[in-house]
Image: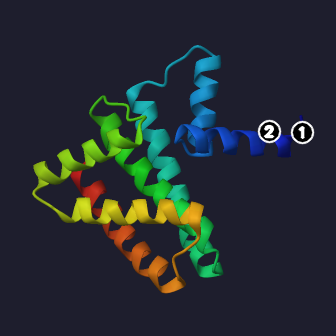
Amino acid sequence: MGPRQLSEKLSEKAKEMGYLPEELGVELLSKSLNEELDPEGLVEHYQFLSEKYLDEARELLKKGDLVQASEKFWGATALTIKMLAAKRGLKLEEHGSLWAFVNVLSIKSGDKDIIRFFNTANALHKNFYENEMPKEAVEVSAEDIEKLIEKLRRIS
């Protein structure tokens, strides 16, 4: 199996499991080496990937690649949330656990926009699969994601 096929296989498996490809890659590598990432390493990993995805999302949006931009904005959001969870010693693996944690963050901070904006992130994630949102909708959603990530980073 060549590098391209391996990359496609990793992307497929990640999609099935609800991971982002780089996130699943690190997960599989740590399991094959029989090593768990320590909480601090996990926080750094999620923070790095979140920033990387956010930068890539902005570029993709500028280029007009709405489908890929949508997924990268979703990824940046999900990884920022996972980073906050990791700082608290939690590991969120299921999509529902992201929602539960977002709900807790919203309640504790008294900021209902966290839930509203996370709902927007989910719409972008859906757009990755269905490609139904027009450019303006993705652009407005991207503004909300930028606000959400800023809010989440302030919580930490």
> What's the residue type where badge 2 is placed?
Leu
Residue 14 visible? The answer is yes
Along the horizontal axis of the image, is 71 left or right of 41?
right
In the rendered image, residue 143, in percent from the top left (x then y), is placed at: 39, 76
Q: Residue at x 51, y 77 (%)?
A: 133
User: Which residue in the structure is indicated by mark 2?
Assistant: 6
Along the horizontal axis of the image, is 3 left or right of 117?
right
In the rendered image, residue 40, in percent from the top left (x then y), is placed at: 39, 31
Callout 1 secondary element: loop
Q: How many marks?
A: 2
Q: Quadrant of residue 25?
A: top right
> What's the residue type where badge 1 is placed?
Gly
Q: Nearer the viewer, residue 13 or 60?
A: 13
Furthest residue toward top: 34
Vertical position of residue 120 compared to residue 37: above or below: below
Along the horizontal axis of the image, is 85 left or right of 74?
left
